[in-house]
């Protein structure tokens, strides 16, 4: 991708030189750059937006243009710079460039800006909409509306006319002026010139949003949403077929809130909502797992066309699937469950609002400290708020449940709550996973194990390769302490497997660069190390959310030499492996052979919660093609983790399925006699005030039967 942009930039430099020598082509080239820049903004391709803006700037700097043309293109250039900063959540910088463009427009009221002035006003209004200053947004759109009708640059009913009018209408609706907003929307949709295009479909979505804001006609809104979804789904799949993984990611996270805006319809048509969820949730994971970083394959795009009936055919008697969805309604976040059983249509159940869950859990939900978790998972009131009476009634008679989480559920192991203790519960990234062929895990397939890592030293002498410099910056000043060797479960599992095709990396040889080079060849991977996640929170709105992909660089696992690299002021993190394997770097690997990826580390399941699930190691692994993941939700206890992993892999050796092996391993933590046998020989020393000296305390009384130990790890996307 980087090379592609370098070549593109080089082409623009050459084109600028050519144009300087051929001044008659300057305007047409500038018009082309503006068009491409606007298209890049629609798809949230930030690097391209700046590239086009810089190219326009260079042409304007090196060529003489008539004053009116110079003003026109300067407005367009500043608008693109504003777009670039808007996409990067630098709202003050965006406002600065938008204001520069608007000042030029205001000072030259009789200049023909060829529509650039109207585009700039729309995007300035969008900025104010984003910060919830709806009054100012509506005022700017009123100005744009007057200008559009006065200068006649757009035909009544064409796409630009329709977009401007509908943007004005949604701003009015946010101010409570529903009659005026609906009047505008009805009029403009009726006189639209192209009723089969994407712009008309987007306008239908805005119309549906206005109807819902006004509590006017939910069935009219449903009809509008269905039209929008059908058109946008087709358009999305066509665009994905031409985009790289990075472009798909940027485009989808801009589009997603519009697609799922229909969740506020709730029980109006649950079947439609289930189809929307199947398409939208985990879409990037599915496409990436089948396509990698290349353009989307035909097979990956076909997999996005499933309907709820397809999922139902995979459910056997007494089985159910739930898609949990978090959505905004009436200014508040809501949570719902789309329940699909082996017969009948989907059912929508409104659940406890996320705010009430968060208020109840306090810091315990977001905390990664173990001691906070016992209180959290022993809270019977919280359990009933998650698994509500209505939801449990809908699952009467169900013995196996597949669910895909959303919102706070990415941080909470709801599958371990007592309400579902008698049900086999499977956590999936999307219930679409049921459509994939079930692969049988083979214990004796080649495995890669990394543990006992020396964080001070890397002796592998790596050659230069691309590295995630953002991760290096995020963890500057961080220190990773060496883990206790007795809890290094990888050497025990390596001995347990006794397989000549396995590879064990340890000490100074367990480096990031070696892992990245050899990991694609293994069917099973287990890493015992430090993991970390430092969260950021992107801002978004229902109009056009910002895309922020830095969170993929802020979820890491540590490898050899990381401490020495982080404190080396001369280290180049752009071209040298730094010992921090980020989720972003994981996502670029080809791990399609890997049936099971286990990270025995702290916080490995965490990440920024987004429209496509968890932006973190989860998403990095799924993008890389991993089938099943075993990850942690908080800072784990080394002793309990060592026991869990040894039991898990022993169970796999004995022929158990992934899920059976993990379930039995968790049970081993609940049995005191098992723990006693394992830990009988270990001891520690504590200060005894009676003798004023230290005394030995045998650890054979240690128990790991509390949630902080038993609920720390979750298994994701196991189907067996």
Image: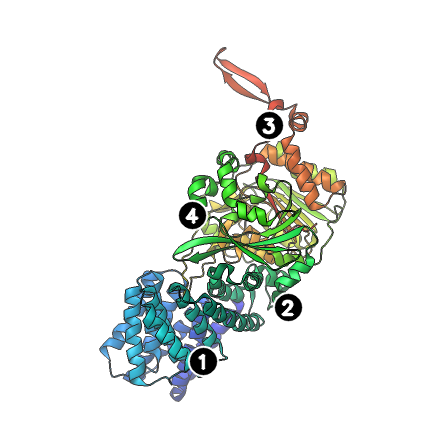
Mark 2 vs 1, N-terminal side: 1
Give the label, 4 or 2, closer to the camera. Answer: 4
**Is 593 above or below relative to 28?**
above
Label 2 to label 1: alpha-carbon separation: 39 Å
Q: Is disc 1 in contact with disc 4, using a CB cutoff of under 8 Å?
A: no
Give the label, 1 or 3, closer to the camera. Answer: 3
- Residue beneath label 3, please? 703
Count numbered badges in the picture.
Answer: 4
Image location (x, y in percent) of residue 693 = 50, 14
Q: Is residue 415 left or right of residue 660?
A: left
Question: Which residue occupies 66% across, 67% down?
Answer: 299
- Residue beneath label 4, please? 355
Would you call the spot at circle 4 few (<14 residues within 10 Å), some (14-19), or many (20 or more)? some
> Seen from this angle, which residue lies furthest left?
107
Q: Is disc 1 in contact with disc 3, using a CB cutoff of under 8 Å?
A: no
Question: Which residue occupies 62% across, 54% down?
Answer: 321
Mark 4 vs 2, N-terminal side: 2
Would you call the spot at circle 3 few (<14 residues within 10 Å), some (14-19), or many (20 or more)? some
- SS for callout 1: helix
């Amino acid at each position: 991708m980087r090379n592609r942009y370098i070549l593109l930039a080089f082409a623009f430099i050459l084109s600028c030189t050519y144009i300087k020598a051929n001044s008659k082509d300057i305007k047409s080239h500038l018009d082309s750059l503006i068009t491409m820049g606007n298209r890049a903004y629609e798809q949230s391709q930030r690097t391209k937006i700046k590239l086009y803006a810089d190219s326009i700037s260079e042409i304007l700097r090196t060529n003489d243009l008539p004053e009116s043309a110079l003003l026109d293109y300067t407005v367009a250039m500043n608008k693109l710079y504003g777009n670039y900063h808007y996409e990067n959540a630098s709202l003050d910088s965006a406002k600065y460039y938008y204001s520069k463009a608007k000042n030029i427009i205001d000072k030259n009221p009789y200049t023909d800006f060829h529509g650039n002035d109207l585009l700039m006003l729309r995007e300035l209004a969008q900025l104010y909409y984003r910060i919830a200053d709806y009054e100012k947004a509506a005022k700017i759109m009123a100005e744009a509306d007057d200008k559009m009708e006065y200068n006649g640059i757009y035909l009544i009913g064409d796409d630009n006319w329709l977009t401007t009018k509908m943007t004005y209408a949604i701003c009015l609706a946010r101010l409570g002026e529903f009659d005026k907003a609906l009047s505008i929307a009805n009029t403009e949709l009726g006189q639209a010139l192209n009723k089969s295009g994407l712009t008309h479909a987007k306008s239908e979505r805005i119309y549906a949003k206005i109807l819902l804001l006004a509590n006017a006609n939910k069935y009219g809104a449903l009809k509008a949403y269905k039209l929008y979804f059908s058109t946008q789904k087709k358009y999305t799949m066509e665009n994905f077929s031409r985009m790289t993984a990075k472009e798909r990611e940027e485009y989808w996270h801009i589009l997603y809130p519009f697609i799922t805006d229909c969740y506020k319809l709730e029980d109006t048509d649950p079947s439609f909502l289930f189809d929307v969820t199947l398409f939208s949730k985990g879409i990037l994971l599915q496409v990436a797992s089948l396509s990698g970083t290349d353009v989307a394959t035909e097979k990956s795009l076909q997999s996005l066309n499933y309907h709820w009936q397809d999922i139902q055919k995979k459910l056997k008697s007494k089985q159910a699937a739930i898609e949990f969805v978090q959505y905004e309604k009436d200014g508040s976040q809501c949570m719902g469950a789309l329940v699909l059983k082996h017969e009948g249509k989907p059912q929508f159940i409104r659940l406890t609002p996320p705010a009430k869950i968060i208020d109840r859990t306090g810091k315990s939900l977001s905390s990664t400290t173990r001691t906070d978790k016992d209180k959290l998972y022993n809270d019977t009131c919280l359990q009933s708020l998650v698994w509500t009476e209505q939801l449990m009634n809908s699952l009467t008679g169900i013995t196996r449940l597949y669910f895909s989480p959303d919102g706070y559920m990415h941080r909470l192991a709801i599958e371990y709550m007592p309400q579902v203790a008698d049900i086999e519960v499977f956590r999936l990234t999307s219930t679409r996973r049921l459509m994939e062929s079930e692969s049988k895990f083979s214990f004796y397939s080649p495995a890669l194990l990394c543990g006992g890592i020396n964080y001070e030293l890397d002796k592998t002498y790596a050659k230069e390769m691309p590295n995630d410099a953002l991760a290096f910056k995020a963890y500057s000043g961080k220190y990773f302490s060496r883990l206790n060797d007795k809890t290094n479960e990888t050497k025990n599992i390596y001995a347990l497997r006794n397989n000549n095709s396995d590879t064990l990396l340890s000490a100074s040889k367990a480096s990031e660069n070696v892992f990245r080079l050899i990991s694609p060849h293994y069917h099973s991977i287990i890493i015992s190390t430090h993991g970390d996640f430092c969260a950021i929170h992107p801002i978004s709105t229902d109009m056009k959310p910002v895309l922020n992909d830095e969170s993929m660089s802020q979820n890491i696992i540590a490898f050899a030499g990381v401490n020495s690299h982080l404190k080396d002021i001369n280290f180049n993190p752009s071209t040298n492996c730094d010992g921090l394997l980020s989720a972003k770097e994981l996502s670029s690997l080809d791990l399609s052979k890997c049936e099971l990826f286990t990270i025995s580390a702290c916080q490995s399941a965490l990440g920024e919660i987004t429209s496509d699930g968890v932006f973190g190691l989860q998403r990095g692994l799924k993008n890389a093609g991993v089938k099943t993941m075993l990850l942690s939700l908080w800072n784990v206890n080394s002793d309990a983790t060592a026991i869990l992993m040894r039991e898990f892999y022993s169970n796999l050796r004995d022929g158990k399925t992934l899920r059976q092996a993990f379930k039995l391993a968790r049970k081993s933590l609940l049995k005191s006699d098992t723990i006693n046998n394992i830990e009988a020989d270990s001891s520690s020393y504590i200060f005894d005030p009676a003798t004023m000296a230290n005394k030995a305390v045998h650890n054979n009384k240690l128990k790991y039967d509390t949630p902080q130990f038993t609920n720390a790890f979750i298994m994701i996307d196991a189907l067996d």
